[in-house]
Image: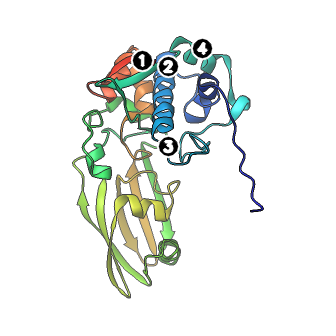
Amino acid sequence: NSNLLLINELNLEDYLVGLINQEISSRWPMEAVKAQAVVARTYALYQKKTKKDPRYDLESTVTSQVYSGIDSEDELARQAVKDTEGEVALYNGELIQALYHSSCGGKTEAAMDVWGKDIPYLRSIKDSPCTEAANYFWQYSMSLRELDNRLKRQNRGIGGIKSISILKKSRTGRVITLAVRHSEGTSKMSGREFREAVGLENLRSTDFTVKAKGDLIFFAGSGGGHGVGMCQWGAKGMADDGRTYKQILKGYYPGIAVKKYR
């Protein structure tokens, strides 16, 4: 139908080498890089097992994991993959849903509070080592008109925004539900939906406050990503403190085992 879909077929371990420097830096402490390798391997195999599109297993963007091919490979990434070759995270003998994110802002989030599903190894934990993350604190501002346009693109029937108020937060302070008052009435949205509408690169996480002043709206928040599972900057901090990659993984995913996958 006049479209071209390019599918890159490659060995799993080679895929991981080309992924490391897109997700973190291979120059981080090696135990943190190894933790990333195990998590990325587990995530890839889990997606392959539960894939929805029969033509391919993963996309090369943040939709799955960021992969850029040979250009981002280096010896440090290759070493981390080789040292953990075949190792995955398992819970009760099954591959875990190995979710991870950039920075949790001090506490990871429970899967229950993001997707409404209780997953025993994806619970909230206190995570102080991620404080050196560049996005530990962040700010973003935009005009009400621009916000209006972005919400309209989500086909929400919202027009003429008057105010935004947070209705419910999770135990870690992340926005679960908010209300948008506009010319057509009041619309409720989840924090995740609102973040996607405004732009993931603008609202770094759902841990934010919101204030309106004149025709501008101001957001201030902490952390980057959905906050569930392993915090990459926290893993770096733990490795700096002398934790091994297995200790890091078991800290973020309680009750798991790290073993070779057959």
Residue type at tag 1 = Tyr
The residue singled out by tag 4 in the image is 79
Side of 33 where 116 appears, left or right: left
| Circles 4 and 3 in contact, beta carbons < 8 Å | no
| Circles 1 and 4 in contact, beta carbons < 8 Å | no
In the rendered structure, which disc, 4 or 3, sits on the residue that comes first in sequence? 3
Q: Which labelled disc corresponds to residue 169?
A: none
Residue type at tag 4 = Gln
The residue singled out by tag 3 in the image is 51
| Label 1: which secondary element | helix
Residue 250 visible to an observer of this rendering: yes
Residue at 40 percent across and 14 percent down: it is: 244
Residue located farthest toward the right when viewing the structure as drawn: 2
The residue singled out by tag 1 in the image is 245
Residue type at tag 3 = Lys
Residue type at tag 2 = Lys
Residue located farthest toward the bottom when viewing the structure as drawn: 183
Looking at the picture, how far across and down is residue 88, in whole percent? 43, 22
Instruction: State the CA–CA distance, disc 1 to disc 4.
Output: 14 Å
| Circles 1 and 2 in contact, beta carbons < 8 Å | yes
In the rendered structure, which disc, 1 or 2, sits on the residue that comes first in sequence? 2
Q: Residues within 10 Å of mark 3 (few under 14, many from 20)?
A: some
The residue singled out by tag 2 in the image is 34
Looking at the picture, how far across and down is residue 171, in whole percent? 21, 48
Instruction: State the CA–CA distance, disc 3 to disc 1.
Output: 28 Å
Asked if 73 appears above or below 8 in the picture, the reply is: above
| Circles 3 and 1 in contact, beta carbons < 8 Å | no
Instruction: State the CA–CA distance, disc 1 to disc 2.
Output: 6 Å
Quarter location, residue 260: top left
Residue at 56 percent across and 40 percent down: it is: 57
Instruction: State the CA–CA distance, disc 4 to disc 2.
Output: 9 Å
